[in-house]
Image: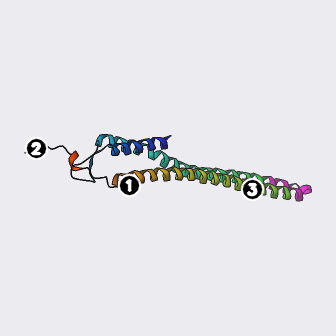
Amino acid sequence: MAELMIEDYLDAMDEILDKAQSFPLSAKKSLVDVDQLRECIDHIRMNIPTEVKQAKKIVSERKSIIDEATRQADDIINRAESRKNTLIAEHEITRAAQAKAAEIEKQALIKAKTVKNAADEYIVDTLTKAEETLAATLTAVKRTKSTIKAPKPAVPMNNIPQQPPQR
């Protein structure tokens, strides 16, 4: 939604520039409504940080997801170690207990790796979307900037109203 609003304001800026009156005797200078242009720029500034904040939040969430996955893996490993030690204490099922503990530990590591991989994939996908949004916005801004800088056609001299010099 913010992207659409930014595009709308960039289009409005293009329109303001298209409607600008050329400054007499200058092909590159025009008179524009500064207040309208500033309002568009202010709206763009208010909307762009949303994507930036979202990208920062994603990076922050990535760390917390990885920390949580690590904590869960540690908990699972600790429970597996505790269970393994208990089973070893029971002499008649020592071998079965060792095998089970190893399997639990293996599954815990697999689960931790799966959770981490899923978190990484989610983060990369979200960052890619944010990057694409920012790139599209930057392209629109550059296009607007180049449009503003592009030379304007010269205004014929016979269209300029004659005014007496002011003192």
Q: Identify the residue at image location x=45%, y=46%.
A: 49
Q: Which residue is mark 1?
A: 146
Q: Say which of 5 and 28 sits in front.
A: 28
Within-10-Å neighbours for mark 2: few <14, some 14–19, many 20+: few
Distance, label 1 to label 3, CA atoms, is 53 Å
Residue 110 image label? 3
Within-10-Å neighbours for mark 3: few <14, some 14–19, many 20+: few
- Front position among marks 3 and 2: 2
Q: Which residue is mark 2?
A: 164
* For the residues bearing labels 2 and 1, Cβ distance under 8 angstroms: no
Q: Is residue 90 magenta?
A: yes
**Figure quadrant of the C terminus:** top left
Distance, label 2 to label 1, CA atoms, is 36 Å
Horizontal and vertical percent for residue 139?
Answer: 46, 53
Residue 24 image label? none
Left or right: 25 in relation to 99: left
Task: Work out whether mark 3 precedes mark 2 in sequence or the reverse, and give the earlier one.
Answer: 3
